[in-house]
Amino acid sequence: MYNRLDLVNILKPWVYAHPSIIAAWEGGSAATNRMDEFSDLDLSIVAIDDQIEVIFADLESFMKKHFTILRKYRVPEPAWHGVSQCFYQIDKVTPHIYLDIAVIKESQPDKLMEKDRHGLATLWFDRKNIYNPTPSQAKDIIERGKKLFSSVIHTDFIIIIEIEKGITRGHFIDVFPTYFSFISRHIAIMMNLKYRPEKADFGLRYGRIDYDLSDVKLIEEAMKVATIEQLKVQFEQLLNRYQALKEELSKTWQ
């Protein structure tokens, strides 16, 4: 069975030797000091603009010499991040590992390199000094944050009414998805703007590291509800925290 390091050792020489690949680096957990034995291989490849499909085809041919590709998912394009991305599940690897391969055109302006958002990548090679982990510009953080703040404060009344209606009706299975959406969107954006505005659009992921312990506890307890009565109690606490954050953050983000 191959582990993550084995995959790196197999793929790196092939990537380095490919004539259309200019640079390559590991992102994800490798860039954020969160890597463990279950982490996927998150590889970014910068390529000559018209060689994207060639690289994917060549990569898959190479991989088939070592593994069986069990499943793959190519993100439809244009993707939100502007790069070409494909996920691969392969055999002969330790549990929970898959490949997340992003091929980026050399001309693509945003190569997802800002260290405050994506961490410090593990650089495989860089023939043109492309990798630049300069943090996000303040104007970009402010613009993104204000859009997200506006999106939640102008829609909160709808989701709050729907949750309160569901609680009154007493149908747990009907109200829970809306309740969870309130946590994962409205609460998450407010928490992110407070604790990590550069990652305002990251949802709850890794919030356990960045948020105050009391807010981590609030969210964890809110996710443990199993009855309509528990949901009602936790929603009251969430709503109080949301309203307090809304007032506090409006000074900066409205």
Image (cartoon, rainbow, N blue to C red):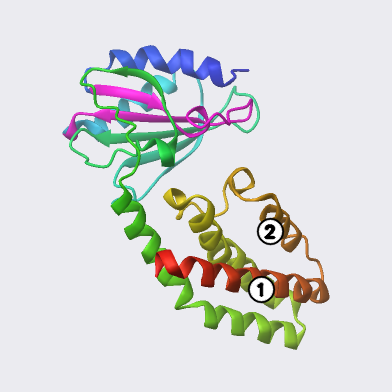
Image mark count:
2
Q: Tell me which residue sits at (58%, 31%) in the image.
A: 34
Q: Three-letter amino acid code at disc 2? A: Ile
Q: Is residue 101 magenta?
A: no
Mark pair 2, 1: CA separation: 13 Å
> Which residue lies under the disc numbered 1?
240
Q: Tell me which residue sits at (37%, 65%) in the image.
A: 147
Which quarter of the rendered picture does the C terminus lie within? bottom left
> Callout 1 environment at 10 Å: few (<14), some (14 to 19), or many (20+)?
few
Q: Three-letter amino acid code at disc 1? A: Asn
121 relative to 85, above or below: above
Work out whether residue 170 or residue 89 is closer to the camera in this orientation and state it: 170
Q: Tell me which residue sits at (58%, 61%) in the image.
A: 184
Whether residue 185 sits left or right of residue 49 in the image: it is right
Nearest to viewer (mark 2 / mark 1): 1
Work out whether residue 75 or residue 225 is closer to the camera in this orientation and state it: 225
> Which residue lies under the disc numbered 2?
219
Which quarter of the rendered picture does the N terminus lie within? top right
Whole-percent x, y for residue 123 in the image: 38, 21
The kind of secondary structure element at disc 2 is: helix
Whether residue 20 sits left or right of residue 77 in the image: it is left
Work out whether residue 14 or residue 206 is closer to the camera in this orientation and state it: 206
Q: Is residue 40 magenta?
A: yes
What are the residue bounds of the magenta stretch? Answer: 21-49
Whole-percent x, y for residue 113 in the image: 34, 35
